[in-house]
Amino acid sequence: MDQQSERALRHKRAMQRKKAHVDERIAQAVIDKGLLVVLTGNGKGKSSSAFGMLARSVGHGLRCGVVQFIKGQWECGEQLLFASHPLVEFHVMATGFTWETQDRELDIAAARQTWAHARALLGNPEVQVVLLDELTYMLTYGYLDANEVLDALRERPAHQHVIITGRNAAQALIDLADTVSEIRDIKHAFNQGVRVQRGIDY
């Protein structure tokens, strides 16, 4: 047997072992439940990933809800795409970032008003996917009561998926989640003086 044939045979055997391992893990995964997914970390792409899941859900005909906390007052591409979609209920706090408002009491009032929409979605068994974009900041800054938020997540309908984004996710939120991904900041164009770009950053 020549070298190329030996390599092809080794590859085939390795892939057979890998397939057996993957098939076994798939066979062991028998639970169906609503997932709590947390996307955190300092890197770019948390909301982008979350809205990718939202697009996938809409593609499957699932009824979805979106609540965006502390986003800027300009229109984001995801809002332009999904806000008028018949399967998506969309709410935006729209006060801008905290360094723009410079008013803690105003921020707290806006956060609580926006949380009311989130709470309603989390209590609605007809809503199958809820995206709480930038919610982590509301807990970090103390704008929302952490126990109230955690209780609402625990008590939501059993089949309902929830996606939460934002930096510095609280440990209690991480502990409650089914899936947690941390996006690391390796390099960002903004740090080289590049302005935020339409379609990429908002």
Image (cartoon, rainbow, N blue to C red):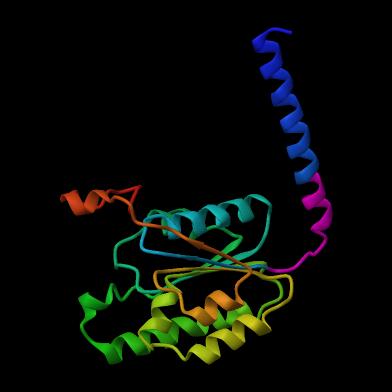
In the rendering, at what x and y percent does residue 177 appear? 60, 72
Residue 161 within the segment the image draws in magenta: no
Residue found at x 35% / y 84%: 141
Above or below 93: residue 45: above
Residue found at x 29% / y 62%: 74
Splitting the image into 4 quarters, where does residue 37 fall? bottom right
Report the magenta residues as a range.
23-34
Splitting the image into 4 quarters, where does residue 128 fall? bottom right
Q: Would residue 191 be found to the left or right of residue 152 on screen?
A: left
Q: Would residue 104 be found to the left or right of residue 173 on screen?
A: left
In the rendering, at what x and y percent does residue 50 appear? 51, 59
In the rendering, at what x and y percent does residue 70 appear? 35, 73
Q: How many badges with numbers are in the image?
A: 0
Residue 30 within the segment the image draws in magenta: yes
The residue lying toward the viewer, choosing from 14 and 31, is 14
Which corner quadrant holds the C terminus? bottom left
